[in-house]
Structures are given as C-alpha cells and as structure tokens.
Image (spheres, grey):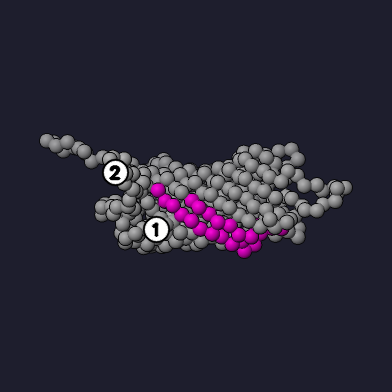
Amino acid sequence: MGILSVGPAIRATQPPEVDAKGNAEPFAPDAGAWIRLPLKTTENFSLGAVTGSSAEDAEADKLAKELANPIASLISVPFQANEDWGYGPTGNGYKFTLNIQPVIPLSISKDWNLILRTILPIVSQHDLFYFANLPKNSPLQPQNRSQDGLSDTTQSFFFSPKNPGPFGLIWGLGPVFLYPTGTNDLLGSGTFSMGPTLVVLKQAGGWTMGALMNQLWSVVIEEHRSSLSQMFLQPFLSYTTKTHTTFTLNTESTANWNNPPGDAKWTVPLNFQVSQILKIGKQPISIGVGGRYYADSPRYGPDWGVRFIVTLLYPTAKPKPASVAGTYAK
C-alpha cells in the first residue's frame, strides 16, 4: 500500500515548536548551510553551491522537520521510485514502482486541519508469476511475463488538531479509501475498499518518532475477484541534523488477512533512508535515497530493494504584514 516513505508530510498549521515524518530527505557541504544551485547563463556559464542566509537556514531547518511529520503544515509532492528484487517462483522477478504522493493540508476551522494524502502507483513488473520449465500439458501455464500500468490508488483523509495534545503528541484520524484503478488484473485488487486510518507522533529536538496505520475492507468487488482485508502499519523513527539531513528508519508492513492457510500473511520490509533539503533556484526540494531488506514476505515475495525519492516542497503561505500609516507594506 504505499507508504508513508515511512516517505512519509503535512499539517495545515505548524504546531508550536515541537519540532519535526520519518519520510524526510540527504547532503550539505557546510554545517548550517542550505544548498543553492543557481543556474545562470550570461557570458560565462556558472553552476555552483552557495551558502544561504540565516533566514534561509532557519527555513530549511523548519522544512526538514515538517517533512518528517506526516501531518505537518506543508504542501509536498513526493515522487518515490522503488525497485524490488527476488519475486516469483524463480526468484528472478523484479518490480519497479513509482509512487506519486501529493500531500495537501487544509484548514477547516480555527482548531482543526484536514490533511489529504494520495498515493498513485505506476508499476512495471517482470516474472512475478512465471514458472520455468512447465510441461506443455500443464494446467498451469505462465501468463505474459511482464505487466505495466497503474496499480490501485490509496487516499487518506486525516482530521488533525492544529496544536499538539497532551505530552506534545501530534495526531490525525480519519477514513482511508482504496480505488480500483489497476489497469491489469495482476496490478490491482479489483475492489473498492475503505476503512480507518490513524497517525500519532512526537517531535523533540531533531527527533521524530511515531506510527501510521490503516485497515481496509472490500466494499465493492469486481466479478471473479476476491475480497480484501488488509492492514498497513508503519512505525518510524527519524533524526534531523543541523545541516538539514534526515536519517530515517521504518517498516512499511502490510498484513493480508485473506492469504490462504500455509502462506505468510505479513510483508515486512525494513527501510533505512537518508534525505537532504536542497534549493534549486527558489524551489525547495528534498532528495533521498535508501535501501530495504524484507524480514518476512508471503511465498514468492521479494527479498530486498532500493528507493530514490524527490519531493517538491511548498510551504504554506504566511500572512502579509499590515501597512502602517505613512508606510507601505512590502
């Protein structure tokens, strides 16, 4: 189901200084420096990194901590590329998934935000269902060895208080929906599913720790398809340094409760990711890279994988200062 790469980043108003979803992002040359990559074309072409001002440095620090918080006051658009190996009966299958994961926080009242998180997976997979050396008269014949297209789309709606609760806890609760957007029977579940979703976290200093979960049940099932009962669980722990580098450890575990007896129900990838806040021109972004090992998976599941993620960041607008008599507001 797509994670939170643990990517896991939004909250329509930043809470008081409780610091910052373990999905954050990697590398700065000097401590406290926010990398700029100005691209100029004059008589001489120049491309280089320059140290930002203290204001920019403070903004980068805030962005890194907001990005570590799945329900922070930050509009973000992650493009998360995942490659996993070891699939299928032969163990040679592999799967590429590009998750497009826009996160949009909306202020719905004085005290509450609504955070909309969407995961749209674009998939290319090979030999996940291929059996080598099958007899020609076998009733089980391999289907086409490759499938490409869209998988099912997941959309979560988190209702979250604008201010942290007791003990500095930040939380969000709401419904989650699974839409049957798979363009191939082997890429989607063929069901419209729904259920509850919850995220709870705490931030202190550069640390962010918490968990995100949801449970989906089939509501409408396409003909000849099976019902779905699936839970997603993502505990995460991240640390953001003074150079806006974030180190994240999480697991994006999925339990398929309807798996047949004798087959494992859990898929448990252990993820480690490093990410960094950068700035290209005026656009703040986060770039991250990571790897994962599958501690458990159903029969014919993957063994290990890698991840690369680029996240476009759009800090929520700040109110303009009011003009004073005899002056002009800038």
From this viewpoint, is residue 12 visible? no
Residue at which label 2 appears: 44
Query: What secondary structure is found at the residue carrying circle 2?
Result: loop
Query: What secondary structure is found at the residue carrying circle 1?
Result: loop
Residue that sits furthest to the front in the current view = 43
Residue 146 placement (x, y as % from top left): 68, 45
Which disc number belongs to residue 27?
A: 1
- Cβ atoms under marks 1 and 2 closer than 8 Å: no
Q: Residue at x 36, y 58 (%)?
A: 28
Q: Residue at x 37, y 51 (%)?
A: 278
| Residue 237 is a magenta residue | no
Which disc number belongs to residue 88?
A: none
Residue 213 placement (x, y as % from top left): 55, 54
Viewer-proximal residue, 122 or 256? 122
The amino acid type, in three-letter code, at marker 2 is Asn
Residue 247 left/right relative to 146:
left
Residue 176 placement (x, y as % from top left): 56, 45
